[in-house]
Image (cartoon, rainbow, N blue to C red):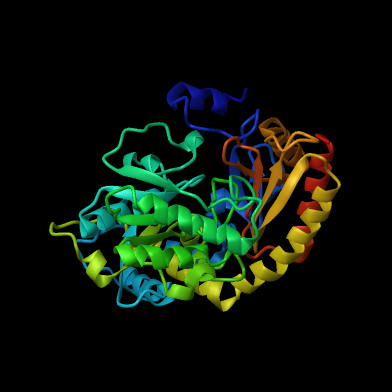
Amino acid sequence: MSSLHHRHLAVSPEWLALYYRHPLEITHGEGRHVWDADGNRYLDFFGGILTTMTAHALPEVTKAVSEQAGRIIHSSTLYLNRPMVELAERVATLSGIPDARVFFTTSGTEANDTALLLATTYRGSNQILAMRNSYHGRSFSTVSITGNNAWSPTGLSPLQTLYVHGGVRTRGPYAHLGDGEFIAACVADLEDLLGHTRSPAALIAEPIQGVGGFTSPPDGLYAAFREVLDRHGILWISDEVQTGWGRSGEHFWGWQAHGRNGPPDILTFAKGIGNGMSIGGVVARAEVMNCLDANSISTFGGSPVTMAAGLANLSYLLEHDLQGNARRVGGLLIERLRAVGAASECVREVRGRGLMIGIELVKPGTDEANPEAAAAVLEAAREGGLLLGKGGGHDTSVLRIAPPLSLSIPEAEEGAAILAEALRTVA
């Protein structure tokens, strides 16, 4: 055990998770690579949990942070803040929500917490519809709507949560159905559920479930849900903390794969927009955002430094068409990984879009989740110089791949080769 690991254990809660048998201290990064305290270099296929969205040490972002810090670091939202207004204007336009208002927070958890506050206040209801296998944060309210028991340590909550089918396409009671039948069955289940309860405030859903293992429904499910929700006056919250900003390649926001009946009422975001800086936020149409009848501020949300970083990062993302790069390089990477998976009895499915890819591992010859294999592959990939993530529903048996969106084709090929070798260690 390293000295730093020993010190960490002495002062940190037992439930604070660490990757690897011998946890890694990352000291610096550049582009798509990071280095540890021992000087080892790794290709980063997880980006600080999808947070280093463009690249490590991106000069445009580090310059913006340095210059803003040299002027003023903090003022709070009690004062006018030019970088915050400029970023809010850009996010409001990009969101697709008409007459949008933007509130900045410091994390995705806080963004979802704010969305729940808005929805329950606007609707006068404490009931929330959420998806099975979902994850929405670590606050008291967000763990209570999280449909993944590995990340929801308490059932105590001021909210009443009702879980809906549909977030996982290839498992569950409707997995055997075709896409159209799957959507119809999920809609019928939602209709039936609403016949047995008081009217909920909102449905909150990740278009692609992140911690759940990069699972998703067929395109159009949430558009079909929207027709039911609108009849009941129920709001739709799209949790874009992991799917936003073009990571899926095909769309800038995950909700756009389900946009036939328009944008969500509320959209939450975080992670990638700050490229490592602490930015989260909520976008909602004005009548929903303005429904609160008490004052509020954010001490650290909308910080001049984080807003400067977000502006620089968003500009880089758009100017360099990183969404297009995610589509092109991600398409190649998922092809390579499906070929790798076809050669392993441990791989049940390789799924995903753009640079958001999951590899689900099972015990050979069965459909049973294999978290031990996932842990072993994570370790073997690290030994080969590749950092991955983990996730999944009933068991943590999915390898999560989400590199910075500037990933090159040679780097994608290199990562796929390392992963193929790592999978051979558990075959």
Q: Is residue 93 above or below residue 222?
A: below
Residue drawn at the location 74% of the way across and 41% of the way down: 381
Q: Is residue 63 visible?
A: no
Answer left or right for 268 relative to 47.
left
Q: Nearer the viewer, residue 2 or 45?
A: 45
Residue extending furthest toward the left: 294
Residue 219 spot, x, y in % from top left: 57, 66
Percent from the top left, x then y, of residue 359? 70, 48
- The residue that appears at 49% across and 45% down in the rendered structure is 132
Q: In the figure, is residue 56 to the left or right of 274?
A: right
| Quadrant of the frame with the C terminus | top right
Count of numbered marks:
0
Foreground of the two, 203 or 144: 203
Q: Position of residue 114 (x, y in %)?
A: 30, 54
In-image side of 190 versus 393 (left or right): left
Work out whether 203 lies above or below 425.
below
Locate the N terminus by quadrant.
top right
Task: Residue 155 in the image: state x and y as whole percent.
Answer: 36, 33
Residue 177 in view of the camera:
yes
> Does residue 127 appear to the left or right of 64 in the view shown?
left
* Residue appearing at x 54%, y 75% in the figure: 318
Q: Nearer the viewer, residue 401 or 23?
A: 401
Q: Is residue 296 above or below residue 140?
A: below
Above or below 178: residue 165: above
Nearer to the camera, 13 or 171: 171
